[in-house]
Amino acid sequence: MYSEYYEKHGANRNDLLSNADVVFQTLAADRANIAALRRVDIDRTSARVLDVGCGSGSSLLQFLRLGFNPENLTGIDTSEERILQARTLLPTLDFRVESADRLPFEGESFDIVFESTTLGTLESAQLLSSIAREMLRVTKKNGHVMLTDWRYSRRGSGVKTAMNRTRIADLFDVGGSTVVVAREAGALVPPIGRRLSRLAPSLYFLLQAILPPAVGQITTVLRKL
């Protein structure tokens, strides 16, 4: 999904230690996810969480830090290499090489079905619809779909489909099968946010607050009806 992007920019493009540009981008995404989860009434000891397009497992690491039970955390990705990395990083979690449009789980299996910057990397409307249907299918009634993604697309960024309000509403049948329970501002658009993160980090969250159009990444939580 991001293979072309990393071929162009290098494997360490989003490495926190070697690239100061992404530090506050990561902090902003984490803060948005935490704020969104505060809006959800859930038992962290029993809640089952599925990360769709989990990559090397960093998003599920955040759920661990927040006190979710590792026995209930599952991640799927189509990349065998990334799943191997995830299993090395978090060996007690359930990581599987699977396709998101054909999830190998029974209906209503998970309390939270999560994706982070996965859907926006896809161009095919048919594939996006299939994945969204599968995400909804495996979400329990009154469970939640949690989307952390970019609402703008930009050539060369790796984001091919803007996951804005309209597209989310269409894919996840907002108002019919789901309702929005949270929308939290995350990272600024990278051309602005990466520069601020490196040169003037103290201004990052100030700009996020006073200039909403500059926020590129949004965490949206939907409750399945």
Image (cartoon, helix red, strand yellow):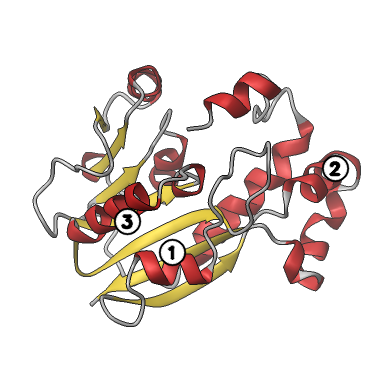
Secondary element under disc 2, as helix, strand or loop, is helix
74 horizontally vs 33: left or right? left
Q: Name the residue under label 2.
A: 195
Secondary element under disc 3, as helix, strand or loop, is helix
**Dot 1 crowding, Cα within 10 Å, few <14, some 14–19, many 20+:** some
Q: Where is residue 68 in the image (x, y as percent from the top left)?
A: 32, 50
Residue 40: tell me if it is visible: no
- First in sequence, mark 1 or 2: give its number: 1
- First in sequence, mark 3 or 1: give its number: 1
Q: Where is residue 71 in the image (x, y as percent from the top left)?
A: 21, 40
- First in sequence, mark 3 or 2: give its number: 3
Tell me what residue is drawn at x 37 percent, y 51 percent.
128
Q: Name the residue under label 1.
A: 37
Q: Which of marks 3 and 2 is in front?
A: 3
* Residue type for callout 2: Arg
Tell me what residue is drawn at x 38 percent, y 37 percent.
54
Which of the two residues, 114 or 36, is positioned nearer the viewer here?
A: 114
Which of the two residues, 157 or 136, is positioned nearer the viewer here?
A: 157
Q: Mark 3 points at which residue?
A: 129
Name the outermost residue toward the bottom. Answer: 175
* Residue type for callout 3: Ser
Q: Position of residue 140 (x, y in %)?
A: 18, 64
CA gap, disc 1 to disc 2? 28 Å
